[in-house]
Image (cartoon, rainbow, N blue to C red):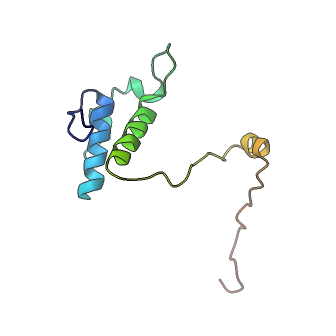
Amino acid sequence: MDATLAAPRTPVDAAAECLRTAARDRIPCPPLRGLIDPDDVATAPSPPPRPAVPYAVQERLSELRLVDGARVVGRKIGLTSPAVQAQLGVAVRRAASGPSRPGG
């Protein structure tokens, strides 16, 4: 069945479809907290291991965007942890405090 015609079947599908429609129509969607159980926000049941529900919504939305013709042009990784920065050999510049130019 075509992913563009399938009716949302799960809270993850419904949330992703809400975000997809909001982006396509350029109108805000209602808060998703009515679609997703608050207990599902922090963790997902396991086994089997699977991403937490918000990550599942993000993954489903990405799938829908690809169906709509979007394409992947890069990857995002988190480098906020000093341990990860060290592991990947990334030097992070810290923003200077104060004005960046005289009189600024």
Q: Position of residue 85 (x, y in %)?
A: 74, 46
User: Where is 58 relative to 44, above or below?
Assistant: below
Which quadrant is the N terminus positioned in? top left
Residue that extends furthest to the bottom in the rendered view of this protein: 103
Residue that extends furthest to the top in the rendered view of this protein: 47
Q: Nearer the viewer, residue 33 or 74?
A: 74
Q: Position of residue 8 (x, y in %)?
A: 23, 32
Residue 27 in sight here: no
Which quadrant is the C terminus positioned in? bottom right
Image position of 74 (left or right of 104):
left
Q: Position of residue 4 (x, y in %)?
A: 24, 41
User: Where is 32 relative to 73, above or below?
Assistant: above
Q: Nearer the viewer, residue 98 or 25?
A: 25
Residue 34 in sight here: yes
Q: Nearer the viewer, residue 83 or 17?
A: 17
Image position of 1 (left or right of 81):
left
* Residue at image location 78% in from the left, 41% down from the top: 87
